[in-house]
Amino acid sequence: ATSNRVRLVEVGPRDGLQNEKKTIPLTTKIELISRLAKTGLTDIEAGSFVAPKWVPQMADSKEIMEYILKYPPTSLNPIAYSFLAPNAKGLQTALSILKAHPNAYSTLSEQATPAYKSSSLPNESTADPTTKRPLIELSVFAAATESFTQKNLNCSIAESLSKFQEVIEGAKEQDLRVRAYISVVLGCPFEGYDVDPHRVAEIACDLMQMGADEISLGDTTGMGTAPRTKELLKAMRSAGIRSEDIAMHFHDTYGQALVNTAVSLESGITTFDSSVGGIGGCPYSPGATGNVSTEDMIYFVESLGMTTGVDLDAVTDIGAWITNEIGKENSSSVGKAILGK
Ligand code: HMG
Ligand code: MG
């Protein structure tokens, strides 16, 4: 069955906030996540277990995960909350919190299969509604160039992959789902457009072989164009990676995110990352702006007769609120249009 469902992964609480210089109160972060949980989203990236001296804004991610496990936010649908974990230390942090909240596991089995998974099965009626979907997921993050990997992770691509192997194995032992990002897939702040799509596909294959459940392809710089997006997805297909295992992660620095989304949809991709209010930027990608906004994505996807299951008006209100809280302009065109009506 062909599905008209598009799955949005809300990355605002992590990608949107990680680069903010002024410390955002923990209560604001938790309020953001709790409000997003009520909009119909199925996936919320909630924090990052990285070195606080590198990314100080994410230093309270432990408290965020503890809060989610203690008081799972009210929602109408099952939600997975994901956290970045680039190495053994990040993994250990996540596992120690999970172990301190053994009840978290019992609520997990109650979670129904998310709509996007059941609808990707050949026959929707065969979907098992009781399939486990843990509340917590982890993400590792590779990059397609050596120079970006050095800046972001302080090691080579090969070294980063061996660290991720450890994280993925440890997560899998606990039945956690793991997403694997690959950054700078359509352009690098240090190497420009000189990013080989086949190298991206090779890294993706390595990560899938390690057990990653999904690859999120990051256009970190927003330099991606429609033809290059098409070429990249063709290389992924040639390498044998299924479109249902790919998510696209567009930053909108050059204003190409929706065009690249259209091309990706045509290539069969149904999972996209976005951030409420278009908040964000990458600390190691100078000048990069936020992800394409969740508001713009919902509006665009619905205009094509597809559905996200996410409430546009609710997300618009959250976009207005959080951009005001952090003293940033709302960079969602759709959000601003709705608010200005
Ligand atoms: P390093 O300095 O090579 O690591 O950093 P190290 O092992 O030598 O440790 C140095 C210090 O960091 C030690 O502390 C460690 O304990 C600590 P000290 O002894 O100096 O007090 N440390 C940690 N602390 C907490 N959690 C950890 C951890 N690991 C080490 N997990 C490291 C290597 C990867 C840690 C570092 O480079 C780092 O944290 N980088 C941050 C990278 C990052 O968060 N980037 C932004 C996210 S990726 C992104 O935004 C792109 C994405 O959105 C997709 C896209 O748009 O393309 C996903
Ligand atoms: Mg990003």
Image (tube, helix red, strand yellow):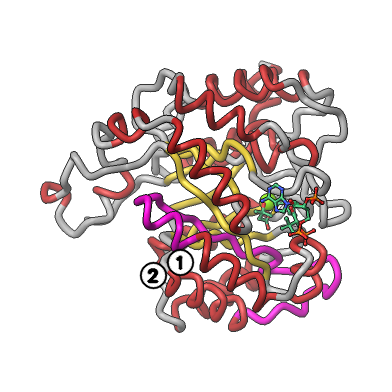
The vertical placement of 26 against 205, above or below, is: above
Q: Between residue 226 and residue 135, name the one nearer to us.
A: 135
- Residue range of the region highlighted in magenta in the rendering: 168-197
Which residue: 86% across, 70% down?
Answer: 190
Which residue: 64% across, 66% down?
Answer: 142
Whether the magenta-drawn stretch holds residue 181 is answered as: yes
Q: Is residue 50 left or right of residue 193?
A: left
Q: Quadrant of ligand 1?
A: bottom right
Query: What residue type is disc 1 on?
Result: Ser
Which residue: 70% across, 25% down?
Answer: 336
Query: What residue type is disc 2 on?
Result: Arg
**Which residue is under mark 2?**
242
Q: Between residue 104 and residue 125, name the one nearer to us.
A: 104
Image coordinates of residue 309 in percent, x first then y, are 39, 33
Q: Secondary structure at mark 1?
A: loop
Image coordinates of residue 118 in percent, x first then y, are 24, 48
